[in-house]
Image: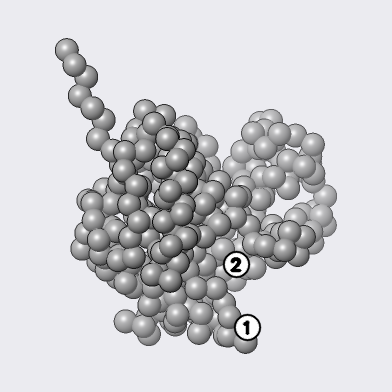
């Protein structure tokens, strides 16, 4: 009996001419996200001004002759690009300009993510998963989701896996262990300076981690360094994170689709009021991937130290949501 062919997954990557997308597309096309036997249809969405560069990326993808790539399409129209989309990586966003307030940046990005949210709502497949990478990621995801009322809110995630991976890396270096030795690390809140990398529940080689690190190092060095790692990379490299951001996007979508086998990872999706977070805010929490969905880890005991830092993120995201709500 002839085995029926596997239907391709329709994948859209926005900001397709950028550096993050350039690293991301080959990983998706090689099976690192959806599986080594899962073909993909790739759509590269870009603004018209960057369309020629996106065409060049598409040419390189084609020249790679990757066996899992079924089709490659370049688009500058969101309504067409998201037609039948099963997965969308929303990478493209407007960076903060010189002298521009955060509110101005949110308003400018709001236009982008309102349009994309509406297009996803009208055209995407019923099982679509949307990962917002472009900053400010949490509130951009909030805006896109609000613009797509027919898509369940938990299908819009903001990428905090990069913060999670940075926390794992710094702890692993500090303890001189592989990152795989670490479990139950979480980064609460917002992909911004207020974020809270938390080791309260973490283990290293199965043993509690908190008593293996100096408290002053944890509070005064580790927490702020994870939060400001992006700026540190710009200072050293002269450019923002690209390959590590793409790798985190791969990790997030892969675990969303294929599961985490019980491992905790950091996931930012619409809150259902757990841990005192306003319902609807896109907020980073510990979660487990299972059956194609995320299950937030519920019922954790939270100390005053933790609650203060979680609340700082609630306050920041609440303010951003107020600016975002005014766009509708």
**Foreground: 207 or 324?**
324
Q: Which residue is mark 1?
A: 98
Q: Residue at x 59, y 71 (%)?
A: 312
**Relative to 63, is 232 on the left or the right?**
right
Disc count in the image? 2
Image quadrant for the C terminus?
Answer: bottom left
**Foreground: 303 or 59?**
59
Local SS, label 1: loop
**Relative to 63, is 230 on the left or the right?**
right
* Circle 2/circle 1 CB separation < 8 Å: no
Where residue 153 sits, quadrant-wise, is bottom left
Residue closest to the far left = 1
Q: Which residue is mark 2?
A: 192
Mark number, residue 289 = none
Q: Position of residue 163 (x, y in %)?
A: 61, 54
Q: Residue at x 49, y 54 (%)?
A: 21
Against 315, is 182 above or below?
A: above
Q: Residue at x 48, y 43 (%)?
A: 26
Q: Position of residue 326 (x, y in %)?
A: 37, 85
Crowding at mark 1 (Cα within 10 Å: few <14, some 14-19, many 20+): few
**Relative to 283, is 198 on the left or the right?**
right
Q: Position of residue 29 (x, y in %)?
A: 43, 40
Where residue 15 sits, quadrant-wise, is bottom left
Foreground disc of the pair 2, 1: 1
Q: Position of residue 232 (x, y in %)?
A: 74, 62
Give the Cα distance between marks 2 and 1: 18 Å
Q: Residue at x 36, y 44 (%)?
A: 293
Mark 2 / mark 1, whichever is N-terminal: 1
């Amino acid at each position: 009996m002839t085995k029926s062919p596997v239907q391709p997954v329709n994948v859209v990557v926005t900001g397709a001419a950028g550096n993050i997308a350039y690293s991301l597309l080959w990983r998706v096309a090689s099976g690192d996200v959806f599986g080594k036997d899962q073909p993909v249809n790739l759509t590269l969405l870009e603004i018209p001004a960057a369309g020629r560069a996106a065409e060049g990326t598409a040419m390189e993808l084609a020249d790679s002759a990757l066996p899992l790539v079924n089709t490659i399409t370049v688009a500058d129209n969101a309504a067409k690009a998201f037609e039948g989309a099963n997965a969308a990586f929303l990478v493209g966003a407007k960076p903060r300009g010189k002298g521009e307030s955060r509110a101005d940046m949110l308003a400018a990005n709001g236009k982008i993510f309102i349009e994309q949210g509406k297009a996803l709502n009208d055209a995407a497949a019923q099982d679509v998963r949307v990962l917002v990478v472009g900053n400010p990621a949490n509130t951009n995801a909030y805006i896109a989701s609000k613009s797509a009322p027919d898509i369940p809110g938990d299908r819009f995630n903001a990428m905090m896996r990069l913060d999670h991976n940075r926390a794992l890396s710094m702890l692993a270096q500090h303890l001189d262990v592989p990152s795989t030795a670490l479990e139950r690390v979480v980064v609460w809140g917002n992909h911004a300076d207020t974020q809270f990398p938390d080791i309260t529940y973490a283990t290293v080689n199965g043993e509690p981690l908190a008593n293996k690190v100096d408290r002053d190092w944890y509070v005064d060095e580790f927490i702020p360094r994870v939060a400001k790692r992006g700026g540190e990379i710009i200072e050293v490299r002269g450019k923002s994170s690209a390959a590590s951001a793409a790798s985190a996007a791969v990790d997030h979508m892969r675990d969303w689709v294929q599961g985490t086998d019980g491992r905790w990872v950091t996931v930012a999706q619409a809150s259902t009021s757990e841990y005192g977070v306003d319902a609807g805010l896109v907020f980073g929490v510990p979660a487990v991937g299972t059956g194609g969905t995320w299950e937030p880890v519920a019922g954790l005991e939270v100390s005053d130290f933790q609650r203060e830092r979680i609340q700082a993120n609630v306050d920041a995201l609440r303010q951003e949501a107020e600016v975002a709500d005014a766009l509708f």
